[in-house]
Image (tube, rainbow, N blue to C red):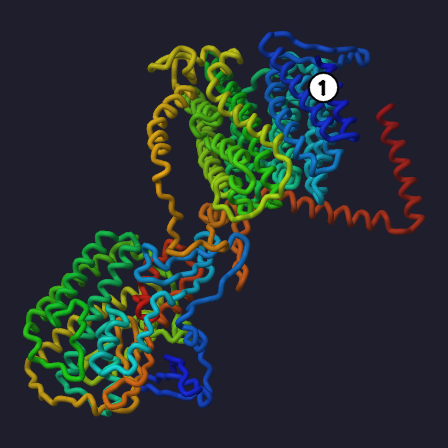
Amino acid sequence: MRLLGVFEKDSKELLILQDRNQLSLENINDVKEDFANYTMLKNRDKHIGSKAVKGNGVFNFRYGPVTGGVGDAGVFNIYTYGERILSVDIDPGYKKRNIEILIKNTALHQAVNWSENVCSNFAFSHSCAFLRAVEKAGNFRSDEVTQRIRIIGIELERIYNHLHVISRLSKGASQNVLASHLEGLFEEALRTNNLFSNSRFLKHTNGLFIDKNNFKKLDEVALKVKNVEEKFRELYEHSLASWNFIDRLYKTAMLDQKKALEIGVTGPTLRAAGRREDLRVYEKFYDNFKIITKDKGDVLARMQVRAEETMLSCDMVINQIDKIKKMRQNHNKIDESSISGFGMGYCESPSGLVLYSVNMNKGIVQDVYISTPSVFGFKAFADSFVGYILTDFSFSFDSFGINFADCAR
Amino acid sequence: MIYTIIGLYILGSFTGFIGRKISYSMAIIASVFSFIAGFEAKFTGNTLSAVFSFLPGITVGINIDSLSGLFLMIAAISWTAVSIFSLDFGNNYRKRMAVFLNLSMLGMFLILTAYDALTFLSGWEIMTIASYFLITEHEGAYKEAFQFLAFSELSTIGLILAFVGLNASDGSFALTKIHSNSVVFLVFASLAFIIKMGIVPFHTWLKEAHSKAPSNASALLSAPVTLMGVYGLVRVINITGYTHVWGLLAIIFGSISAFWGAMEAAAAKGLKVLPAYSTVENNGMILAALGLSAVAYSFSTKSTLYEFAFLTAVVLSITHTIAKTLLFLSIGQAKEQLHAENIDNVRGIHKSVGKIPALGILVSGLSFSAFPALLGYVAEWMLLESIFQSYQFSSILDRVVSSTGGVLLSLAMGFASFSMIKLIGYSALGYHHEKKAEPMPTFFMNTAELFLIIMIFGISFFASYLFLGLGYSKFVIGALGVPQGWLLASAKPVFGVISPAFFVLVITALSVVPFFVYFRNKSTTKKVTSWNGGLALKEEEYFTANAFSFTIEHILRFIYMTKEKVNKNRSYVVVSDVFESFYKYIVTFIKKISYSISIFVMNGKVYFYILYILIMFILIFVVFGEMFA
């Protein structure tokens, strides 16, 4: 059982719990289990991490909110007496946009836009999780072709995100040649997204019904994906032969499985710690899906999981395109204004579980709670980075594939 | 002149009980006279002498020859500055500080001018005891003062044994000529003087005493008091002549000491601990230079290396005495006005305390970092040139020792720059923290600091005249467009050259245009605070001096014995000086032993005491009976 969210409604504190692919909303008084991440989730918009450390010569190396090396606005309060990291306290508040409030009382298509704007590089995962929650609320499922197109979108998103993460951590570990090649592949992946959906970040594509006829260049997409996979495989094999590269990633920012489960972290970070968990395995249209795991829980393991998932995602995109091409799609238009009720939906984003809890009334969003992988990722980073040195910051952080926009919403 | 100087110091001591200002003024006058006496002896060739027969066959007295004159001049610069500084600084302490300051200077004067071993020992003890009391002027500094006393008395024992050896070799106590080749004298005198210089492993007292002593006393202890050790060694060489093995050992101990001192200074966080370790480093360099001179002399007197290496030791001594006095006085003023002990707590001295003490820290620190145009640059260039010239040595052993020593000395110079940049950056120039300095009279403190700053620039600029004055005209040439008399050469025929004066002139000339442009556009120059992530820096967000040092403390953790104490909410780093740990172990061991013996002997039983007295009585009779039989 994992705690994914804590929020108040009608003066009651409610917990969002996950057990494998089962999601539930419980009153805190009805839950007997204690969750180590409860306080962290309650304060997720104020600070994530550990308390300040004091001592002779200890100071707060504040990194951010607007500093080279920190991708988007946010503050890392890094307590240190030199190179050694003693404690990390993260303030994600600078990127707070109150999307959960902005999304209230909006129509479905506007709400989808808002969900995509939580974090552009997880735009498709967010819209998927939101739409799946809406489907639950309306007690219906989208058609098979729509679901399979969503899988292509999710996996394309995974491919470019993973390429970006590996490229960033290669650069952080001074592997500039590898990083440059990977940046090239990353650009290629973004162009493939554009070919697929007319959006480099796969925006404005998702919906309760996705018309297959809008996707005219699926063959070209498959070809490009295959090309990306081949090039990436070659680069990845080369990178594993570099002793200098591996030495920097190996046993750096280690997070063991027990700690990862306590934090509530999901996705590649959890799988790199040895936990065989990926909610895609429960989804109907993922054919022959296999979960990739590593057991060290360090930067190298996280990179390996992402690298192998990239190649797996490429295969899945190609297979799904093959299948969609042979399928016929029923044009059953869904009446959005009839959707009412409560539902929760999730999506296995490139960095972990995105979850939406939605209340709908006649096609209008009444309230929403968003659980993002970056909240847990930041806590995982803050805890795993203690004891290491500042020089390891960039690739340690990048290995979690998280960002402030996703965390602060 | 000699009696006047001694009289003034004694008068200064007595007047200390009446009024501080009169006492310190006496010290200033006596110090200026000391400089004049030294100048006269060194440059006019007049030996000032006041010698008389003390006992049959024992002549005692004062004799200021050329060597005494040179060191008297160097020491007198420091004494003068310390005395002027104390006119303001002394107000914060009891009257008796003035008494001990005068006595300490009197002791040093006697050391430098002693004709014989007995006068030398008298001066040594006066200096030691007065310095002990000066350290105790700081509240709660008894432990540190006692440690200073313990090491000083160890060197006194060494000196007594050395002078016994000197007398046994030719029946004389005279210190003024080459007349003995006594190994006992050479070994024990060298040991006594390197203890006073704070050479590793006898350096631990420096750190303890300096961090606790009042800052004028710290300046005195670090610069002229350790200079007495250098003078002593030079005097020993003057009596026994150069010895090859002594030279090799001096290079080994000197270079290790320089490396160790510089390395510990790089990790130091205490405001006065860092300069204390810098003293260990500087004196190590001086010892190594003397060692190189001795080895070079044994190799060949035709080579100019032995003379150049000796001159290097002299210039290093001048540099160290002046710059270290300045550093301690400037830091001392800040420490006193800010009531702070650590480098981190005095940031922004230039704003909180004043521009002159900040400039003092900057100039002395840069001098120790061998910054061009400053005296330290000349000294360290000379040391490197001396090391480079050791390629001439024909013996493999000499080459190995000199080149290994050279590596350690070069590393020491690197570490010294690191530590001085830390000190300057965090104290003199660091971000100001709106900390208010306690108001106190600063005219004389600033005057003393300015005097030393001018000395550092001036001696560097006129370094060629210093060479000429010291009788080393062969190392002053003219070439490469530099007029005759303004270029320093490290050998004859020429090996390496520099011209500090021309360097200053060229830099000044090149700076004119940028400065002109800057001042012309000053009104239109936009000044902004540095970008710190978009937020103003809070007090707890400033990069600490500890953090600055941690990288090397971690890399060299096997030498520093670095221990990272990481607790839940309180963390810090501990580095240790292995020699300090060794002495602590010895102290603990001796305490245990003495406690056990005291329990055994003083057991409260009367019959045991009577038995003890009887045994001792019989033993004394037996032992003395045998001796006088």
Let me know if residue B291 appears in the view.
no
Q: Is residue B405 above or below residue A62?
A: above
Secondary structure category for the residue under label 1:
helix
Let me know if residue B144 appears in the view.
yes
The residue carrying mark 1 is: B117
Residue B242: quadrant of the picture: top right
* Residue A133 located left or right of residue A54: left
Residue A43: quadrant of the picture: bottom left
* Residue B402 located left or right of residue A183: right
Position of the N terminus of chain B by quadrant: top right
Front position in the image: B27 or B246? B27
Q: Chain letter of disc 1?
A: B
Q: Is residue B485 above or below residue B92?
A: above
Q: Residue at x 36, y 73 (%)?
A: A265
Looking at the rendered structure, the kind of residue marked 1 is Ala
Residue extending farthest to the front is: B523
Q: Residue at x 74, y 15 (%)?
A: B3
Q: Is residue B446 above or below residue B344?
A: above
Front position in the image: A188 or B291? A188
Give residue A379's position: percent from left, percent from top.
40, 69
Q: Residue at x 26, y 53 (%)?
A: A175
Give residue B122's position: percent from left, percent from top.
75, 23
